[in-house]
């Protein structure tokens, strides 16, 4: 139980023990002693000692028939407590000015409200974008980058009423969507496209003179707790290889709760 020699103040044996617990957490199912030892690059005897301590503390449990190890009730309690303390919206809001400064684009933070995607934070870029958007503005579901991300990353039951309303309004007015089908099949195809890309982007056809791109801040279920949107006037800003797009996606990924492989848990 010696202190770490690098002066960081940690305990080396505890660091190694936690490697075993993390290795177990990263597996999708229960694991054998030999599997964990191989994952950690440790002798099985050492891993066994660490697992014995975790068993005593309730962080690990062992199946009687197979002898394999899995996360125990203390691990579950700790994980749920961490999830409950994760404040998606405030963390994103605090970091939003930095994103606007880094990209040179106006940044919005939106949540799902009673009327759909709702702006809760607005961070203007140095070059002011003239738009009728402001705090409390409700954005369309099908024709805004923000709305399309919510469409893709929220359960269908949540977006169903607004989805049907916008489709009905389009049918009544004779309006056609340029890039999606005018029915549920088209909407589902759009959601799949957004999920595959990990973001949504719209050009000036919906808001003349403005372009926008958006990405989700995901919770442990892979659902959007918030959406970050960047707005500009240059169509090149939303190109697939645009630096700002990559910055936005990295920003959102850092604020999301992800699983072991970097994907939503």
Image (cartoon, rainbow, N blue to C red):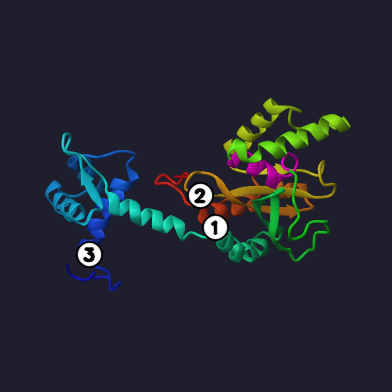
Is there a contact, CB below 8 Å, between mark 3 and mark 1?
no
Tell me which label, 2 or 3, sits earlier in the chain: 3
In the picture provided, is 218 more to the left or to the right than 71?
right
Residue at 34% x, 45% y: name it.
26
Say above or below: 61 vs 131: above
Check if residue 142 falls in the magenta segment: yes
Q: Quadrant of the N terminus?
A: bottom left
User: Tags 1 and 2 in contact by the CB under 8 Å rule?
Assistant: yes
Give the number of the disc on residue 219.
2
Which one is in front, 57 or 254?
A: 57
Q: Residue 121: x and y, percent?
A: 68, 61
Name the residue: 85% across, 47% down.
208
Residue situated furthest left in the rendering: 45
Position of the C terminus, as image quadrant, is: top left
What's the magenta region? 141-154
Q: Is residue 31 visible?
A: yes
Mark 1: give few (<14), some (14-19) or many (20+) Cα within 10 Å: some
Q: CA distance from mark 1 to mark 2?
A: 8 Å
Q: Position of residue 251 (x, y in %)?
A: 57, 56
Task: Say left or right for 111 vs 175.
Answer: left
């Amino acid at each position: 139980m010696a202190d770490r020699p690098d002066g960081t103040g940690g305990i080396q044996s505890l660091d190694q023990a936690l490697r075993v617990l993390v290795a177990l957490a990263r597996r999708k199912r229960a694991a054998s002693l030999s599997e964990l030892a191989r994952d950690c690059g440790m002798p099985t005897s050492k891993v066994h000692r660490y697992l014995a301590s975790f068993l005593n503390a309730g962080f690990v449990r062992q199946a009687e028939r197979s002898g394999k190890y899995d996360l125990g009730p203390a691990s579950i309690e700790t994980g749920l407590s961490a999830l409950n303390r994760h404040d998606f919206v405030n963390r994103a809001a605090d970091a939003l000015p930095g994103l606007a400064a880094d990209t040179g684009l106006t940044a919005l933070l939106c949540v799902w409200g009673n009327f759909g995607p709702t702006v809760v934070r607005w961070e203007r870029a140095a070059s002011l974008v003239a738009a009728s958007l402001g705090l409390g503005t409700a954005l369309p579901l099908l024709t805004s980058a923000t709305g399309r991300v919510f469409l893709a990353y929220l359960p269908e039951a949540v977006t169903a009423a607004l989805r049907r309303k916008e489709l009905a309004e389009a049918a009544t007015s004779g309006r056609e969507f340029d890039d999606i089908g005018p029915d549920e099949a088209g909407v589902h195809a759009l959601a799949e496209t957004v999920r595959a890309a990990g973001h949504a982007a719209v050009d000036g056809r919906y808001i003349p003179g403005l372009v926008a791109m958006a990405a989700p801040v995901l919770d442990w279920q892979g659902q959007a707790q918030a959406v970050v949107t960047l707005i500009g006037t240059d169509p090149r800003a939303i190109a697939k290889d645009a630096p700002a797009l990559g910055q936005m996606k990295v920003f959102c990924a850092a604020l999301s709760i992800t699983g072991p492989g970097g994907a939503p848990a």
